[in-house]
Image: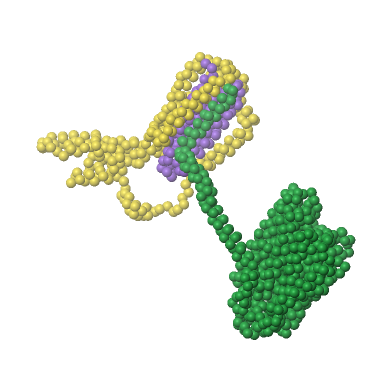
Chain colours: A green, B yellow, C purple
Amino acid sequence: MENLIGWLVAAPLLGAAVLLCGGKRLDRLGHWLGTLLAAASFVIGVLLFVDMLGEDEHHRAMHQHLFSWIPVSGFQADVAFQLDQLSMTFVLLITGVGTLIHIYSVGYMEHDDRRRRFFGYLNLFLAAMLLLVIADNYLLLYVGWEGVGLASYLLIGFWQHKPSAATAAKKAFLVNRVGDVGLSIAIMLMFTTFGTFTFGPVLEATGETGEGKLTAIGLMLLLAACGKSAQVPLQSWLGDAMEGPTPVSALIHAATMVTAGVYLITRSGAIFNAAPDAQTAVVAVGAVTLIFGAIVGCAKDDIKKALAGSTMSQIGYMILAAGLGPIGYVFAIMHLVTHGFFKAGLFLGAGSVMHGMNDEVDMRKYGGLRKYMPITFITFGLGYLAIIGFPGLSGFFSKDKIIEAAFAKGGTEGWILGGTALLGAAITAYYMTRVMLLTFFGEERWRKTATRSPEAPSAEPAAETRGEHAEPHPHESPKSMTIPMIVLAFGSVFAGGLFSVGDRFVHWLEPVTGHDHGDSPLSATTVTLSTVAVLVVGVALAWAQYGRKPVPVVAPRGSLLTRAARRDLLQDDFNHVVLVRGGEHLTRSLVYVDHKLVDGVVNGTAASVGGLSGRLRRLQNGYARSYAVSMFGGTAVLIAATLLMRAV
Amino acid sequence: MSTLAAAASTTSTGEAVQFWVLGTVAVIGALATILMKKAVHSALSLAGTMIILAVFYLANGAYFLGVVQIVVYTGAIMMLFLFVVMLVGVTAADSLTETIKGQRWLAAGCGLGFGILLIAGIGNASLKNSEGLAKANAGGNVEGLAELIFTKYVFAFEITGALLITAAVGAMVLTHRERTERAKTQRERALLRIREGKQITPLPAPGVYARHNAVDIPGLLPDGSISEKTVSATLRGRGQIRDVSGTSLAELAALEQRSEEWLERGGDAEGGPTAQRTPSARNGTHPGGAGEARAEEEVK
Amino acid sequence: MNPINYLYLAALLFTIGAAGVLLRRNAIVVFMCIELMLNACNLAFVSFSRMHGNLDGQIMAFFTMVVAAAEVVIGLAIIVMIFRSRHSASVDDASLMKL
């Protein structure tokens, strides 16, 4: 069975290679090939899962050593896989949601000329992501880490003819690069500290290592996680990443890739457990991002960007939970999985809406769509209920546990974190209700505005073929799109309950991550009740603002906070002023130093050598007789030396 | 001479005398080789030195080498040198003025230092005893050499054979000129001459007034100066032109004088000034064209 | 007289030859000077042969002569070739190998 692990990666990788190198012959069937291979990977994952369930709880980790990549004395880099419960969770999530989104994309990308290439990239992403989660050492993980970065870049910029998409792709790549540098430094630090980067030895050796070093490694890992998972301060790329096709947003920028940071922190749990300072930093980042993303999500009128803000916020929850240590790891992963279901479902729903609305993304131009798209409405609605934490649905269980764990941290810190998480839950309820109301309820605002507003940035190209100015005819999407949505809706509804009954998920992951109940100052019931209470408050607020009154088609100016939130809370402006300007100044001064000082020294050396050689050159006058004189003189000197040595 | 060679640590008086006399001559010959202006003279001086060295070889008991020195070195190699000297044409005598700055001083310094060191080295060496070749040459010098060459040194001997063949082939390759294009016809060469403004007609022949017809005697222009064109460039280059213009003009003047005396005419003839200007017109670099132009002017 | 005087003579001739190489510009004369140096060496070899009482020195001299013959053949061929193309046998004229 263990030999199958490699095929998890190999299947989508093969698909990527065939689809990207295969040429136009594959245009007709390529998308089905890609889907098939993704499904094959899922089937392999399920087989391995069943196999794993048969094992004893503590001996479930499987290993496969493929080959030695760089076998040098003292530096052993292997291509080897480790599939334990944590990896298995990810494998099932990635391949399962990935396969569904492949199927969805068949319908969604039907009118795109480059559909084959799109599926090639998707398969490439799957391969890289699977490599990331089943690698048994940090170096191989880094390969997958960069691989998903590449796939993300390619897919965000898939419609590269749009300058906005090309810029967004570049931005995502560059911001991710900052995080990647963090990861590479962390790996180097690990190598110098532990002499290896295989998970097992590294994580076992944390007990005997100085806390300072572990804190440094932990902070670098956190930086990496911030980059990949769009956490403050490296979150600015996620909103722009919505320029990519919607299935990409669903798969990469909601369900899987952006959660890689959570995986990294959970996987490196032993390091963080031994470095409380790093853990505090993780918690702080998670808490800040949680609120940050939620606020951004409240202000955006672009449905995908609102969902992106929500993603940021939900990953903030996960990071927060992961930062809590053994109390939270399990719940971070659990929320990650349920979030994977409902957020993918929400994005697919958004894609379906856009599909039916001539690729309009501005929610203010939707309204009343529930009659025209019943399936989309129902699945989106279930996803909505799940994310706000409606009792009994997935999000409720996972989020509730995180809030509980935050309180269980204890002390002032616990109160602050718990309060923040509760506040986040309220805002989540608010902005998701807003999205729901704007899209599916209220009057049919799209009838008034057949023309597209110029500020809708995310114009997908298919719109041009269908006629930009035609009044939209909202319609339900084809089966290939609705079926994945239905499946994901099922996941959104039942996954949480399935995981929570009898603490199944906790038991499942406990051997890998460890678990600790902590001592909450509040009882579980209190927390649950307050969660439901803030949920009701959030929904009610949104209803008051968007449900009772008609919604203006053109967004009102809004308060200072709203305007700031529309601009991603001024993150880009901050980056521009501090990093871009600062970088320019730094570069300019460096150029000055380079010209004056470095070049001065270099050129001075060159000039003096040149001058000296100009003089030495005279010796080389071309006359054979001059050379003969020097030879003769040299001989004389040699004889003299010989005689002298003999005399002495 | 075998008795001389057999001597032990000192040599016989006869050999000593021979050494001091011939040794002096050899050094003089060597100095002449490097100091003579003309390459031919250098070659001859070198040949003399080599013959003396051959004598010294014989005196040292190297009979075979002595003979080889005379036959191969002095006979063949030096003749090859002379042959090349003639072939190359020996453009005049070498100027001995130094052109490279400081070269002469450096050479002198290095040479002196080298020589002193070498002699000091020999003086220091423990070579006081001379064993003599009586034993080695017992079975005959040539036989002794042959035994060594074909046993101990047979490999080196074979290699030198290969070297000689290579050298022969190399010399052939180096001096062989491949004709890369068709030879020019006479017509083409004539056209080329006209296009390049060179001498169109054949060059004038040497010889003066049917008195001299040797190739080294240039013809005279109407003004009595010589025309360089009439002799071969090689002779000109070596400076081997025999200028007879002075005597010819003098004889001509005498002839005119006598004929005037016979015809009893007036004394002032045009021959006087012509005769006077000949010495100044007689120099090697005088261009023929200008001389002819001046001659036309003179003739009116 | 001690046979060592032959060595002094050889040293003297060698030095004269070397000086000639340095001083003369005519390639043919330079060549002759080289021959002079080789001959001086031969004289030394022959003298050593006598002093040590074996014939190896004479063998060396013999090989020197063979090599000198080969060297003269090639050297003169080169001189002739250079003369053909440059119309000069001066070693100073062939001074293109400079900066």
Q: Quadrant of residue C20?
A: top left
- Residue drawn at (83%, 67%), measured in percent from left and top? A524
Q: Quadrant of the N terminus of chain A?
A: bottom right
Q: Residue B65 versus residue B275: which sits nearer the camera?
A: B275
- Residue drawn at (65%, 79%), measured in percent from left and top? A364
Residue A512 lies, in percent from the top left, at 82, 59
From the viewer's perspective, is residue A391 above or below residue B261? below
Q: Residue A369 versus residue A187: which sits nearer the camera?
A: A369
Give the residue at the far top of this rendering: B13
Q: Is residue A42 left or right of residue C62?
A: right
From the viewer's perspective, is residue B271 above or below residue A498? above
Does residue A147 appear in the picture of this structure?
Answer: no
Q: Quadrant of residue A65?
A: bottom right
From the viewer's perspective, is residue A364 above or below residue B144? below
Q: Residue A170 versus residue A320: which sits nearer the camera?
A: A320
Residue A419 lies, in percent from the top left, at 75, 66
Q: Residue A373 versus residue A647: which sits nearer the camera?
A: A373
Does residue B222 appear in the picture of this structure?
Answer: yes
Q: Is residue B188 left or right of residue A402?
A: left
- Residue drawn at (25%, 43%), measured in percent from left and top? B291
Residue B57 lies, in percent from the top left, at 53, 24
- Residue drawn at (23%, 39%), measured in percent from left and top? B224
Q: Quadrant of residue A51?
A: bottom right
